[in-house]
């Protein structure tokens, strides 16, 4: 393994040197690799004499403009678009075979002489997307943030709305409609048996709705022919396989993306559990795009067992309610009304709104306010009683009091000078908070937040954070290097963290040191120094 890694590192360094601009002093690359692919971040040539002037030959003008406006450090030139992905993949394979690491994180530093340093560790460390984006550290790989609807709750107040005989008649009508439009009859798969249905119910731990059973006793899918109004009807075995692999558990994309996860309510409210996956969701039709229609065997209190929801790739922030049953959904495909399907309360139940104004409908749950005049007045938010996420981007506010009565779970905000967090004291639902401030602020309200689990204070000029170790529910913390160092020196690092972020532009070694301080054994980190292939 060592020989393969050394050869790969030397080749990588040689390509970096060969593509370098005049006057460069260093090249820095961070990346990740796994069987699923590789990524690069933070790469660039440091060239103090001519910062930001280096572009690949033939680069289009619009790309030059884009790179010119990148927020790069003043002495870091634009990337040269080196394709180092094959080398990262080679390193990933070597460490997977020799050490069993399913993924790796790495940092390569190279100088004009060809001298380089390579550091590699498991992907418990994840570099950010740019040179100032820091590192995400996974302390407990088994931990995932809980979702509000993942646990079993109260039973639905309604019974099943489907009708097995009507479902079969509507299925036949939908198939006739498809044949008329396509000019080809669909040859359906042979139906399943009662024994197969019983086995499926044992696997799911729940009974199947009568109309779903009736359809599978009619045919075991459409063979992928998109015969159900453009959807492909899954065989029972395929439905169970998709359930087990994708739909039966909450989605999780790692701490860098999901540290402030919010799952939104469906429309109508409280019909579907607030989670991104659940053992009681059985996909029965595929959209051929990573999304599925599923029968919901574990609805929320205002839903119906057997209701149809849309789940999958585009619904990791919550499913979409579709119909009260598969019978009703087939009726929708035929243009028939459904008296059992509740009407949506508003078409704007989960939009992203980027300004304060008349467009704020009462059911808005996700609000991003961009580039408002600062300090922004948040008083209009009183018109959004279901608001769960609020992000202020490139603007600040002086008063958080309008949020005190709102069910906000995720808040990212910059405070104007002199503003404070006092209005959030005791907020019952605030789970993730990212706050920035140009001046020190009083953080006393933080221990009063019973739901707080994720916190980013990396943009606050506050170093006395020893009280954070006493917040029992805190499982993610983002701080600057100085803030982490102060906690380390004081011996007050939080001991219950599942993940952390080291903000700014620290080295791989600094990230490893923090990961070790938080309780992870980093002694297996791989370090190599050498000279580029062909360098004198």
Image (cartoon, helix red, strand yellow):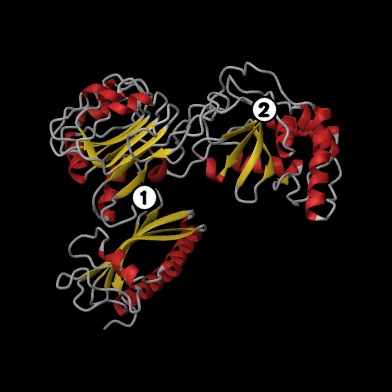
Question: Which quarter of the figure has residue 119?
Answer: bottom left
Quadrant of the rendering where the C terminus is positioned: bottom left
In the image, residue 253 lies at what x, y percent? 46, 44
Q: Secondary structure at mark 2?
A: loop
- Return the residue nearer the eye: 11 or 44: 44
- CA–CA distance between discs 2 and 1? 44 Å
Q: Residue furthest front?
A: 358
Percent position of residue 342, x then y: 61, 24
User: Based on the displayed image, in which of its 4 quarters is residue 398 positioned?
Assistant: top left
Q: Nearer the viewer, mark 2 or mark 1?
A: 2
Would you identify the image quadrant in which residue 285 lies?
top right
Q: Position of residue 395 (x, y in %)?
A: 24, 41
Q: Is disc 1 surrounded by few (<14), some (14 to 19) or many (20+) residues within 10 Å?
A: many
Q: Position of residue 58 (x, y in %)?
A: 35, 79
Q: Which mark is residue 125?
A: 1
Could you tell me which residue is drawn at 25 percent across and 58 percent down? 71
Instruction: Tell me the residue that label 2 is attached to.
Output: 324
Task: Say above or below: 335 vs 115.
Answer: above
């Amino acid at each position: 393994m060592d020989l393969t890694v050394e050869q790969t590192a030397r080749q990588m360094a040689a390509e970096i040197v060969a593509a370098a601009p005049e006057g460069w002093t260093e090249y820095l690359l961070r990346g990740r690799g796994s069987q699923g692919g590789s990524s690069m971040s933070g790469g660039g040539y440091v060239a103090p004499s001519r910062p930001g002037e280096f572009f690949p030959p033939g680069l289009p003008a619009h790309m030059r403009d884009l790179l010119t406006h990148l927020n790069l450090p003043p002495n870091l030139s634009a990337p040269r678009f080196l394709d180092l992905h094959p080398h990262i993949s080679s390193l990933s394979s070597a460490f997977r075979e020799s050490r069993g690491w399913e993924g790796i994180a790495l940092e390569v530093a190279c100088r004009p002489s060809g001298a380089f340093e390579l550091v590699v560790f498991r992907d418990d460390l994840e570099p950010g997307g740019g040179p100032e984006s820091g590192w995400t550290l996974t302390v407990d790989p088994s931990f995932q943030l809980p979702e509000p609807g993942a646990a079993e709750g109260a039973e639905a107040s309604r019974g099943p709305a489907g009708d097995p005989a009507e479902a079969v008649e509507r299925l036949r009508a939908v198939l006739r409609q498809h044949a008329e439009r396509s000019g080809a009859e669909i040859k359906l798969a042979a139906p399943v048996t009662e024994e197969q249905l019983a086995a499926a119910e044992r696997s799911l731990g729940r009974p199947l709705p009568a109309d779903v059973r009736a359809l599978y006793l009619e045919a075991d899918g459409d063979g992928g022919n998109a015969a159900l109004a453009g959807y492909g009807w899954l065989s029972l075995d395929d439905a169970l396989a998709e359930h087990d692999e994708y739909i039966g558990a909450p989605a999780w994309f790692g701490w860098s993306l999901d540290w402030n996860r919010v799952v939104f309510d469906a429309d109508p409210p409280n019909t579907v559990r607030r989670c991104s996956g659940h053992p009681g969701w059985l996909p029965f039709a595929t959209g051929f795009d990573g999304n599925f229609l599923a029968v919901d065997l574990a609805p929320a209190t205002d839903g119906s067992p057997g209701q149809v929801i849309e789940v999958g790739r585009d619904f990791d922030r919550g499913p979409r309610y579709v119909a009260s049953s598969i019978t009703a959904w087939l009726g929708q495909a035929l243009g028939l009304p459904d008296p059992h399907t509740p009407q949506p309360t508003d078409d704007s139940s989960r939009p992203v709104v980027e300004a304060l104004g008349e467009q704020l409908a009462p059911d808005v749950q996700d609000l991003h306010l961009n580039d408002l005049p600062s300090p922004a007045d948040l008083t209009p938010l009183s018109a959004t009683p279901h608001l769960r996420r609020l992000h202020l981007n490139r603007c600040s506010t002086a008063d958080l009091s309008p949020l005190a009565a709102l069910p906000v779970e995720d808040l990212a905000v910059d405070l104007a000078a002199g503003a404070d967090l006092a209005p959030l004291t005791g907020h019952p639902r605030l789970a993730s908070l990212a706050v920035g401030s140009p001046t020190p602020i009083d953080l006393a309200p933080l221990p009063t937040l019973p739901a707080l689990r994720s916190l980013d204070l990396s943009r606050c000029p506050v170093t006395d954070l020893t009280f954070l170790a006493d917040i029992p529910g805190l499982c993610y913390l983002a701080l600057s290097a100085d803030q982490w160092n102060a906690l380390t020196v004081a011996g007050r690092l939080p001991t219950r963290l599942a993940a952390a972020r080291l903000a700014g532009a620290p080295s791989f070694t600094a990230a490893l040191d923090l990961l070790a301080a938080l309780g992870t054994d980093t002694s297996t980190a791989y370090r190599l120094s050498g000279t580029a292939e062909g360098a004198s």
